[in-house]
Image (spheres, rainbow, N blue to C red):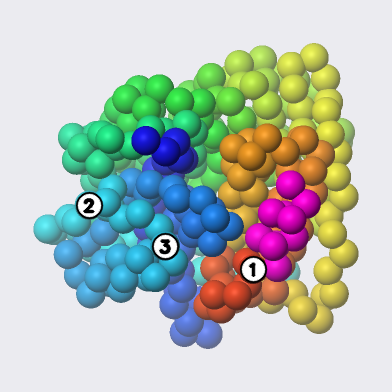
C-alpha cells in the first residue's frame, strides 16, 4: 500500500465580479496542486446533487484528484462564494448551509479505509458546522497521521477560539501575519512576529509554525525560536491578477516538501515561487494543464 496525503475540507465555486466562476476552496486547491506536482492525494469533501456538483466532480477527475472521498448531498447545494476585489486584496462572502457543511463521518471513514495516510491537511473553515467538524475529528483520529492545519479566519464562520482548538498538536501550523496577531494578541502582535509566534506555538503545542506575510515573504518558527526566513519572489505588477489561492499553493508545496524530505528553507522558497505564479491567474487554479510542468521538472531534477 502506497502512503499518501489525505486532504479534508470544502468544495465551492468562487464567483468573481466579472462573472467568472472558478472551482475552489482551500483544501480542493491544495489537493489539485499536489496532484499536478506528482502526488496522489485522497480528497474528503461533499458536493450537492446539483449541476455544480457534477461539474466539480468532473473537474477533480480531470485534475487527477482521487474523488472517492467526495460525498453527494441529496438536499444541500454545492458551495458558493462571492468574491470581491479591492486594493486590500480579495474579500469573500461565503454562503451558508452548503453541502460541505454536512460531510458525513461514517462515509469519510469508509473512503479512508484502505488508504495509508502519512499526512492529513485541513483548514478551519470546513469545521464551521458541527457535522463536518465531527467528521474531521473522526478522520484525524482514524488516520493517526501527522496533520497540517492551515488557518483561514473568515468572520463570522471561524472564531479564533475554534481555530486554536483545531490547531492543537499540529505537526505544522500555517497562518498569515494578520491571523497571527488575532490568534496571539499581546506584545509584538502588530510589530515583529517573534513574540506572538512563540505564544501561538506554546498555546497549540504545534511542531512548526509558518507565518506568511504577502510581499514580505514568510518565516518559519519552531519551539525555542525562529527558524528560516525567505523573501517573496519578485513579481512584475503588470502580471499580477489577484492573490486568490496563493496561500493554498504555498501550503501544497510545504506538504510536498515534508513528504519528500526537502530542507525547510528550500521548501519555503519553492512554496513562495508557486504562490507568486498563482497570483498571475484569475482564481486559485490554472486552466492550463502545463502550468505546473516547469515547477515539477525543476524540482524533480534537483531532488
Q: Position of residue 73 (x, y in %)?
A: 17, 55
Give me the C-alpha separation between circle 2 and circle 3: 17 Å
For residue 116, above or below residue 298: above
Identify the magenta region: 294-303
Work out which quarter of the rendered image holds the N terminus and state it. Answer: top left
Looking at the image, is mark 1 or mark 2 earlier in the sequence?
A: 2
Residue that appears at 44% across and 77% down: 21
| 152 to the left or right of 74 | right
Which residue is disc 1 drawn over?
A: 293
For residue 186, above or below residue 15: above
Q: Position of residue 53 (x, y in %)?
A: 26, 67
Which residue is disc 2 drawn over?
A: 71
Looking at the image, is mark 3 or mark 1 earlier in the sequence?
A: 3
Residue that appears at 42% across and 62% down: 64
Q: Position of residue 87 (x, y in %)?
A: 72, 69
Give me the C-alpha separation between circle 3 and circle 1: 14 Å
Q: Which mark is residue 64?
A: 3
Extreme-left residue of the structure: 74
Give me the C-alpha separation between circle 1 and circle 2: 30 Å
Q: Is the C-beta separation of discs 3 and 1 under 8 Å? A: no
Number of numbered discs on residues: 3
Q: Which mark is residue 106?
A: none
Amino acid at each position: 500500500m502506497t502512503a499518501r496525503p489525505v486532504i479534508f475540507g470544502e468544495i465551492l465555486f468562487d464567483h468573481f465580479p466579472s462573472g467568472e466562476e472558478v472551482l475552489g476552496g482551500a483544501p480542493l486547491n491544495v489537493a489539485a496542486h499536489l496532484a499536478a506536482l506528482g502526488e496522489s492525494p485522497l480528497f474528503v469533501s461533499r458536493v450537492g446533487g446539483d449541476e455544480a456538483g457534477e461539474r466539480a466532480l468532473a473537474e477533480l477527475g480531470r485534475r487527477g484528484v482521487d474523488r472517492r472521498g467526495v460525498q453527494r448531498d441529496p438536499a444541500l447545494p454545492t458551495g458558493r462564494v462571492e468574491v470581491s476585489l479591492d486594493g486590500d486584496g480579495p474579500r469573500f462572502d461565503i454562503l451558508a448551509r452548503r453541502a460541505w457543511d454536512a460531510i458525513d463521518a461514517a462515509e469519510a471513514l469508509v473512503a479512508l479505509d484502505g488508504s495509508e495516510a502519512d499526512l492529513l491537511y485541513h483548514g478551519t473553515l470546513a469545521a464551521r458546522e458541527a457535522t463536518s467538524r465531527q467528521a474531521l475529528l473522526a478522520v484525524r483520529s482514524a488516520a493517526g497521521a501527522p496533520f497540517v492545519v492551515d488557518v483561514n479566519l473568515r468572520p463570522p464562520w471561524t472564531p479564533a477560539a475554534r481555530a486554536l482548538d483545531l490547531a492543537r498538536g499540529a505537526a505544522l501550523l500555517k497562518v498569515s501575519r494578520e491571523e497571527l496577531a488575532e490568534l496571539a494578541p499581546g506584545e509584538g502582535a502588530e510589530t515583529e512576529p517573534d513574540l506572538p509566534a512563540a505564544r501561538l506555538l506554546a498555546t497549540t503545542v504545534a511542531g512548526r509554525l509558518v507565518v506568511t506575510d504577502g510581499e514580505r515573504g514568510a518565516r518559519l518558527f519552531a519551539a525555542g525560536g525562529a527558524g528560516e526566513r525567505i523573501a517573496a519572489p519578485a513579481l512584475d505588477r503588470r502580471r499580477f491578477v489577484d492573490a486568490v489561492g496563493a496561500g493554498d499553493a504555498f501550503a501544497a508545496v510545504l506538504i510536498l516538501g515534508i513528504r519528500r524530505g526537502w530542507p525547510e528553507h528550500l521548501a519555503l522558497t519553492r512554496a513562495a515561487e508557486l504562490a507568486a505564479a498563482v497570483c498571475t491567474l484569475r482564481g486559485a487554479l490554472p486552466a492550463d494543464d502545463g502550468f505546473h510542468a516547469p515547477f515539477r521538472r525543476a524540482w524533480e531534477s534537483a531532488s
